[in-house]
Structure formats: C-alpha cells, structure tokens
Amino acid sequence: MAGSLEGNKILAALLTAGVIAMTAGFIAHTIYSPKELAENAYPIEVETAAATTAGEGAAEPEVSILELLAAADVGKGEKQAKKCASCHSFDEGGPDKVGPNLYDLIGNGIANNSGFSYSSALSGLSGESWSYESLDGFIANPKSWAPGTKMSFAGIKRPGQRADLVAYLRSLSGSPAPLP
C-alpha cells in the first residue's frame, strides 16, 4: 500500500508545481505586460534617397564644394583633420601611417605616394589628380566614391565641414592649388 501512495505523491507534486508555474506566469504577464506606444519615445530621423529626391527631409540643399570653399574656415578644417590624424600625417616629408601622408595633396595624383601600398580601388585611379570635387566626394563617403578602398572612415556628411577640411588640406602645401 505504501508503494502505491508514493506514485500519487509524485504526481501531486508535479501537478502542484505546474499550477504554481502557470499562476506565476499569469501574474508576471499581468504586472509586466508591455504596452504598445502610439509613437516612438525617441524618434530617429533617417534620410532616405526617396525622401531626398522628393524634397522631404532634406536638411540643406546640395551646394558645390567650389562655392563652399569661398567661405571655408581653415581653422575649423584643422579641427576636422584631428579625426584623420590617427591614420594620416600632415607634415611635409612626414611618415606614412595606416594611411598615406596628406601634405600637398590637392592637385597631385591619386595614389602617387610610392612608399605607400594603396588599395586596388585607389591604385586604379593613379592617372587622375585630387581635385576639389574628387576630394570632397571621397571625404563624404570613401567606400562609395572608391568601392573596395581599405579606408575604414565613415565620411563627413555635412558639406560645410568637408569644405573646411578641404581648405585645410589645401593650406598644407608650399604653393597651394589655386581656388577656382
């Protein structure tokens, strides 16, 4: 007789544990149930290509780098260049780091530093020169301008900041390239 009651005790313990678990789950769901928000608490604005072409959400109209260079601030550009200093040097005759030395860049050939190993994306452009427009495009989005580049910089999105940086890079020369 004692043997048959042991099975009942085990079954009763399992059923009781199940009822307690279900009750705890029901109570927890009631107390901590998330409520759907009508709108996001922290909206994140993302500019899409469709919104830009439709004119919605465009922060500022696209202005040519040549127009922005007239009002560019070399001092602000030097501050922008601090983002680049961990990978590039800016001194005449300075060493190559992870990236090549950027002294006397504008007007000179793309991938022209013989002591630096450029990616195939930039080596393929070695016959071309760094113009204001090409440098602006590269700084805006290196991966898009030169697909396959080894440069892991995300780019500078604001045209005014890029113009300041380009003006600073222009000043890094014994004879700066003329402004258009």
Image (cartoon, helix red, strand yellow):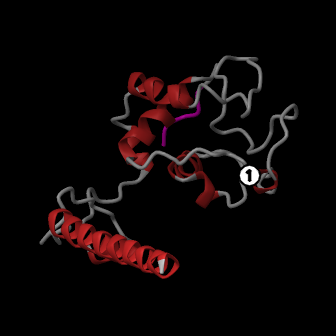
Relative to the observer, which residue lies in front, 15 or 23?
15
In the image, what residue occupies the spot 32% across and 73% down? 16
Q: Is residue 102 above or below residue 135?
A: above
Residue 56 in view of the camera: no
Residue 120 lies in quadrant: bottom right
**For residue 122: magenta?**
no
In the image, what residue occupies the spot 52% across and 31% down? 83
In the image, what residue occupies the spot 71% across and 52% down? 149
Residue 71, given in percent of the width and then of the height, sits at 33, 35
93 sits left or right of 142 in the view: right
| Label 1: element kind | loop
Residue 11, given in percent of the width and then of the height, sits at 43, 79
In the image, what residue occupies the spot 53% across and 48% down? 154
Relative to the observer, which residue lies in front, 32 or 173?
32
Amino acid type indicated by mark 1: Glu
37 sits left or right of 125 in the view: left
Residue 42, given in percent of the width and then of the height, sits at 21, 56
Q: Residue under circle 1?
A: 128
The span picked out in magenta is: 176-180
Residue 4, given in percent of the width and then of the height, sits at 49, 82
Relative to the observer, which residue lies in front, 13 or 132?
13
Query: Total label count?
Result: 1
Q: Main secondary structure of the magenta part?
A: loop
**For residue 178: magenta?**
yes
